[in-house]
Amino acid sequence: MKKNSWISLVLISVFSLSAQAQTKKWSLEECVNYAIQNNISIKQTELDTKTAAIDKKGAIGNFLPSLNANASHSWNIGLNQDITTGLLQNQTTQFTSAGASVGIDIYRGLQNQNTLRRANLSMVAAKYQLLKMQEDIALNVANAFLQVLFNKENLKVQKEQRSINEKQLYRSEELVKAGTIPRGDLLDVKATLASDNQKVIAAENTLLISKLSLAQLLQLKDFESFDVVDGTMAKDENNILSQTPVAIYDKAKESRTELKIAETNLEIAQKSLAIAKGGFQPTLQGFYNFSSRISYADVPLRDGNGTVIGTQAPPPFFDQFNTNKGQSFGAQLSIPIFNGFSARNNVERSKVNLEKSKIAVEQQNLDLQRNVYTAFSDAKGALKAHESAIVALESRQQSYNYAKDKFDVGLMNSFDLNQSQTLLSNAQSEVLRSKYDYIFKIKILEFYFGIPIIKN
C-alpha cells in the first residue's frame, strides 16, 4: 500500500511539472535574454568578433622572426658534378641538402606597429557591432512582445463585446415577446452577434501570428504553446519625459553604440593611412641562413699522377654534414624608388576612406540628434494620444450606457444601439493601441538615454 502511494505521488509530481512546463509564460526579460543567446544574427556577429581576434594575432605575429627549414634529396645519373668535391664524374650519385633560415623585420616604416594598433581598434569595433546587434534585437523583441500583449487585450475586448451582445440577444428576445421592440431589432442583434464572432476569430488569428513572430525572433522551435505574461502598465517609470531633448541627446552621445562604431572606424581609417604612408619608407631586415650537404657516391682514389686506382666509401653522414655546413647572416636594406604608383595609390585611397569616415561620424551625430528629438516628440505625442483615448472611451461608455437604457425601454432601435456599441468598441481598441504605442516609444526614448530595455 505504501509502495502504491509512493508511485502515485511520483506520477502526480511528474504530471504537475509537465503542466507547468506547458503553461510557462515568458516575461520580457526572459525573451530578451533568450534572444541574445540564440538569435542567428547575433551569432553571426559573434563570429566577426572572433575573426577580429584572429587578425590581431596576425598583427602580433608581424613582430616575431620568421623561421623556415628546407631539405632536398636527388639522384644524378651519368656525367655530373659532385657537389662535395666539385669534380665531373660519370657515375650515379645521391645528394642530400638541408638548411634553415631566420628573418626578422628591423624597420618597416612603423607599418607593423600601426597594423597592430589597427587590429586592436578593429576588435573594439567588432565588439561595438555585437553590442549594437544585441540592442537592436532587444528593441525588436520588446516591440514584438508588446504587440502580443496588445493582441491579447484586444482579444479580451472582442470577447467582452460578444458577451455583451449575447446578453443583449437574450434581452431583445424578452423585449420582443413583451412587444416592446419590433422583431427586426432582434434580427439586427443576431447579425451583430455573428459579426462579433468573426471579430473574435480574426483577433485570435492575429494573436497567434504575433506569438509566432515573437517565437521565431527568439529562434524557438516549439512555438505552439508559447505565451507571454500579461499586464503592462502605461507609465513613465523612469520619468524620462521630464528630461529635455538636449539632455537626452547629450547623454546619447556618451553612450550610443552606433556613434562609437563610427568614431572607432574613423580611428581605423587613420591607422590605415599611417600604414599606407609607411610604404614610402625604406625597410630593413635581418637574416641568418644555415645549410649543409651530403653525397652518397663512392669517392675515387687517385695516385700521384691523378689516375683513378680505386674507390672508397664516402665519409659518414654526420662527418659530411659537419664538414660541408655553411652559415650566412646580415641585413638587407630595401629603398622604394618606383613601384608603379602602388604606394602612392594606397595613400590616396586611404585618404579618401579617411574623409568618408569623418563624414560618417558627422552624419551619425546628425542622425542621432534627429532620432532623439523625433523619439521625444513621438513619446510626448503618444502620451497625449493615450490620455485623449481614455477620455474618449469614458464618453463612449457613458453614451453606450445611455443608449442601452433607451433601447431597453423601446426608445431606441437596434441600429442606433449597434452604432453606439461600435463606437465604444473602436474607443476601447484605440485605448489599447495608444497604450502600447506609448509604452514602446517610452522604451525607445529611454534607450537613447542609456536605460536598457531590461534591468540586469
Image (cartoon, helix red, strand yellow):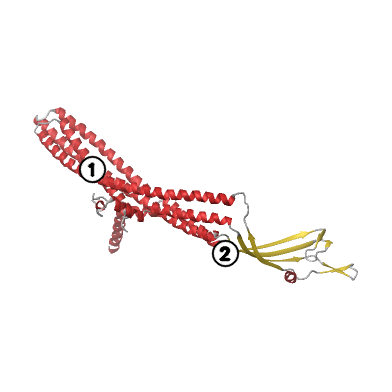
Residue located beneath label 1 in the image: 385
Residue 191, above or below 60? above
Kind of element beneath mark 1: helix
Characterize the local packing of mark 1: few (<14), some (14-19) or many (20 or more) Cα atoms within 10 angstroms.
Answer: some
Residue located beneath label 2 in the image: 64
Amino acid type, mark 1: Ala
Dividing the picture into quadrants, the one containing residue 90 is bottom right
Give the quarter of the figure containing the C terminus: bottom left
Left or right of residue 341, residue 88 in this image = right
Q: Distance from label 2 to label 1 (Cα)?
A: 66 Å
Amino acid type, mark 2: Leu
Q: Nearer the viewer, residue 75 or 208?
A: 75
Q: Earlier in the sequence, mark 2 or mark 1?
A: 2
Q: Nearer the viewer, residue 439 or 296?
A: 439
Does residue 21 appear in the picture of this structure?
Answer: no
Residue lying at 58% horizontally and 58% vertically, measured from the top left:
281
Give the quarter of the figure containing the N terminus: bottom left
Residue 167, above or below 76? above
Does residue 375 appear in the picture of this structure?
Answer: yes
Dividing the picture into quadrants, the one containing residue 327 is bottom right
- Residue 297, horizontal then vertical, whole percent: 80, 65
- Residue 226, horizontal then vertical, whole percent: 32, 49
Residue at the farthest right position: 305
Residue lying at 54% horizontally and 54% vertically, measured from the top left:
276
